[in-house]
Image (cartoon, rainbow, N blue to C red):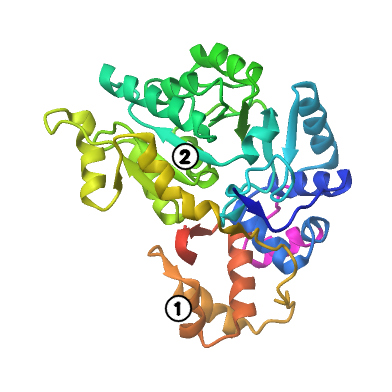
Amino acid sequence: MDAITSQIELTEAERLDRLRLIRSENVGPRTFRSLLAHCGSARAALARLPDLARRGGAGRTRIYSEEEAHAELAACKRHGISLLAPGEAGYPPRLAEIDDAPPLLAIRGAAAAAMRPIIAIVGSRNASAAGLKFAQQLARELGDAGFIVISGLARGIDQAAHRASMASGTVAVLAGGHDRIYPAEHESLLGAIIDARGAAISEMPLGHEPRARDFPRRNRLISGAALGVVIVEAAQRSGSLITARMAAEQGREVFAVPGSPLDPRAAGTNGLIKQGATLVTEAADIVQAVAPIMERPIALPANEPDGDPLEDDMESTERDRIVTLLGPVPVSIDDLIRMADAPASLVRTVLLELELAGKLERHGGGLVSLL
């Protein structure tokens, strides 16, 4: 079974500070993690934000106020939502491993469900009858084997997997806020999931309407929380293939259900099998593959300071040299440190400043580029 090597419990003051930091301008999950590593705490990071952003070339940076944070926490309480940090009980332990894990995850329902071993099932919204039937069969069998099924509450394969695993436990991952369900007709399905001791999770604030770019962000949570991701049906260009790619990048197992070469809804899954995904014809294929992974302990990333100083008196020539090496093409931070011939702490600080100024984008695998 999944083992967690560390467990934390935030004070309400720490939760408030973390909420203010992640909701502040140009602070995403990776930036949040960098700030905690540099500053040691969310409160210290909040104090440094204006100066860091200014040095990166930004004007005034908007910081989420205490009043806004208190109002959001109160609204979450009214909706029965908990805001949990990585390492707290109820935060999916494997999701906490990824480098862009949400600093605070909004969870509604039975948080205990998210702590059990999880398998993701996703696929086509325009699914075939055979695909829907197999997704239901797979979800039931995985539930009987003790797994929680996670999916994205979408039409087609997602909803079939949720409905079939409701009795054993299922988790829905939302692209918008908990009060902005998409598609709207699945509000009743989500209500049934919660009533059946399942759960719903989101990294978005209440009131956030899901946009196109929010669905890939949601997909990384689906794959990140799971031991592995099963793609039941997927066309050549589909969101399910994005989830499969993210799963591979996160070190998760990727499973694919084969289909007829004549059905375009199987083109993506058949392609995944050609690329090395594990072929699935029954739940036992999945259980056998993830059994060794479940025996390994989960090591949550530390948030302690890494010793990188935030120097105020950096030489402008060093800073300019680092910025000059950056461009629109992603480059690894290790290569940047080597080519800049500068201390790693200096390079990371410059990158953090640029990011807070809205001029830098972080990619997976330790890559960065200018916007």
Image quadrant in which you'd find residue 130: top left
Please state the horizontal and vertical placement of residue 168, each as a whole percent of the image: 56, 25
State which quadrant residue 40 falls in: bottom right
- The residue type indicated by label 1 comes to Asp
Say which residue label 2 marks. Answer: 219
> Which of the two residues, 252 or 37, is positioned nearer the viewer here?
252
Secondary structure type for disc 2: helix
Magenta residues?
47-63
**Nearer to the camera, 223 or 335:** 223
Residue 23, label in figure:
none
**Crowdedness near tag 1: few (<14), some (14–19) or many (≥20) residues, C-alpha within 10 Å:** few
From mark 2 to mark 1, how far is it between C-alphas?
29 Å
**SS of the residue under disc 1:** helix
Q: Where is residue 145 shown, x and y percent of the image?
A: 50, 34
Q: Tell whether 304 sits left or right of 265.
A: right
Asked if residue 60 is among those painted magenta in the image, a careful observer would answer: yes
What residue would you read off at disc 1? 335
Other-residue count near label 2 (Cα within 10 Å), few / some / many at <14 / 14–19 / ≥20 = many
Residue closer to the observer: 39 or 259: 259
Q: Amino acid at mark 2?
A: Asn
- Front: mark 2 or 1: 2
**First in sequence: mark 2 or mark 1?**
2
Q: Is residue 145 above or below residue 128?
A: below
